[in-house]
Image (spheres, helix red, strand yellow):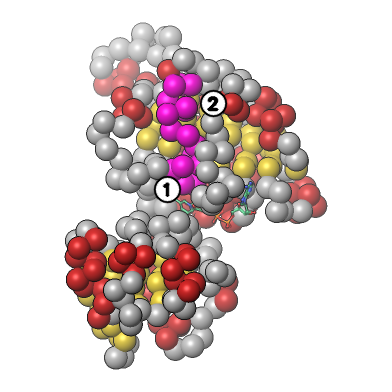
């Protein structure tokens, strides 16, 4: 019998897959404090993981643990050095969430460019004729879009931007120019030039030593004051204090932020009362379809791992 810890509940479609297997049992762990994980996790053979952190301080107690199955594709919440040294496999839900995230970026770009929620508020506040008189709105059509990181999500996004008639540049030193061109994008080799020209910038890189604070005051200074920055990748890719300051000083027009350096975000975070930012609670994948796809794939990956038939595209190479 394989014992699986479900760290943070997910859609019941995923749990159903374990229910159908006689040799798998599971327990949902809702208290994700370090103390509780240290107490609970050592008896499990595998676990699923959403946004909680699995540090070496927790993992060193988990001598039976063979596999961690991420509910998603990012994995900066797992101590990679520790799991590599201790032969723990890490799995991701490859190809389950790029559509929802790309749609979320479009939702943020459209909402910001149409004046955040001013249209809705003007009707509700009885300001039908005057409520949107002074708001700034603009079209996406013909605007310069910069996509940073051209993996699953970047590629799903470019098609949507092209259908809005945007001109798309792509910065991803690890992706071949021909591939970018085949999607209708223009490969950029120097980010600084692209920052100067862009009306919209959307980030789709993992959080690494290389991408930490990739957007900061030095390059925000190069951007147009009409530029909109969207981050659905990871908090930490943008320097949050620099972005907050730049927005308050009208150095850029607006931002859509789904991810934060520290989550859940605290009520004293400067973004909370910055009206130039459209916020969401790390929920870019939170569509009905995506929740089901991710839950099923997270569970199936664990089952396939123990049944020795895991699809290699789900394995993180450490
Ligand atoms: N908000 C959410 O709910 C949510 C959901 C899914 C993914 N994400 C985040 O989005 C990120 C992208 O997801 P994906 O599925 O497209 O990943 P992916 O691995 O398919 O693509 C990432 C791309 O980033 C590129 N890259 C790496 N370092 C770079 C750098 N320094 N400069 C430019 N490009 C660089 C890689 O070459 C790759 O093409 C994930 O790492 C994750 O952190 C967030």
The mark total stands at: 2
Q: Is mark 1 within 8 Å of ligand 1?
A: yes
Q: Secondary structure at mark 1?
A: loop
The earlier-in-sequence mark between 1 and 2 is: 2
The image position of residue 123, as x and y in percent, is: 31, 19
Q: Secondary structure at mark 2?
A: helix
**Residue 260 lies in the magenta stretch:** no
Quadrant of the image occupied by residue 203 = top right
Quadrant of the image occupied by residue 261 = top left
The image position of residue 8, as x and y in percent, is: 27, 62
**Label 2, residues with CA under 10 Å away: few <14, some 14-19, many ≥20:** some
Residue 15 marker: none
Q: In percent of the image, x 72 and y 53: which residue is there?
A: 175
CA separation, marks 1 and 2? Answer: 26 Å
Q: In percent of the image, x 40 and y 14: which residue is there?
A: 132
The image position of residue 219, as x and y in percent, is: 60, 28
Are discs 1 and 2 less than 8 Å apart at CB?
Answer: no
Q: Can residue 120 be seen by looking at this rendering?
A: no
**Label 1, residues with CA under 10 Å away: few <14, some 14-19, many ≥20:** many
Q: In percent of the image, x 54 and y 31: which residue is there?
A: 216
Question: 49 or 198, which lies in front?
Answer: 49
Residue denoted by label 2: 217
**Residue 244 lies in the magenta stretch:** yes
The quadrant the C terminus occupies is bottom right
Question: 184 or 232, which lies in front?
Answer: 232
Q: Which residues are magenta?
A: 230-247
Numbered disc in front, either 1 or 2: 2
Residue denoted by label 1: 284
Task: State whether residue 22 is above or below residue 80.
Answer: below
Task: State whether residue 281 is above or below residue 47.
Answer: above
């Amino acid at each position: 019998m394989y014992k699986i810890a479900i760290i943070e509940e997910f859609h019941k479609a995923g749990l159903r897959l374990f229910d159908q297997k006689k040799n798998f049992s599971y327990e949902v762990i809702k208290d994700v404090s370090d103390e509780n994980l240290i107490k609970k996790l050592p008896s499990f053979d595998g676990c699923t993981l959403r946004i909680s952190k699995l540090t070496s301080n927790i993992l060193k107690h988990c001598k039976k643990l063979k596999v961690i199955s991420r509910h998603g594709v990012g994995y900066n919440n797992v101590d990679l050095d520790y799991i590599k040294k201790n032969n723990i496999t890490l799995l991701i839900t490859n190809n389950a969430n790029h559509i929802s995230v790309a749609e979320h970026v479009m939702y943020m770009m459209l909402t910001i460019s149409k004046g955040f929620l001013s249209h809705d508020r003007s009707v509700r506040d009885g300001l039908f004729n005057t409520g949107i008189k002074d708001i700034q709105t603009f079209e996406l059509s013909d605007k310069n879009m910069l996509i940073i990181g051209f993996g699953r999500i970047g590629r799903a996004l470019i098609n949507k931007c092209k259908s809005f008639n945007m001109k798309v540049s792509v910065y991803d030193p690890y992706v071949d120019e021909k591939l970018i061109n085949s999607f209708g994008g223009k490969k950029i080799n120097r980010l600084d030039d692209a920052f100067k020209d862009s009306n919209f910038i959307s980030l789709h890189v993992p959080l690494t030593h290389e991408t930490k604070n990739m957007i900061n005051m030095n390059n925000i200074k190069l951007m147009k004051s009409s530029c909109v920055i969207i981050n659905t990748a990871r908090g930490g890719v943008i320097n949050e204090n620099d972005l907050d300051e730049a927005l308050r000083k009208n150095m850029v027009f607006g931002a859509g932020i789904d991810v934060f350096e520290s989550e859940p975000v605290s009520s004293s975070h400067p973004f909370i009362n910055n009206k130039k930012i459209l916020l969401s609670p790390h929920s870019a994948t939170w569509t009905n379809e995506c929740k089901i796809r991710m839950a099923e794939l997270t569970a199936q990956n664990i089952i396939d791992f123990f049944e020795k038939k895991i699809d290699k595209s789900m394995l993180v190479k450490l």
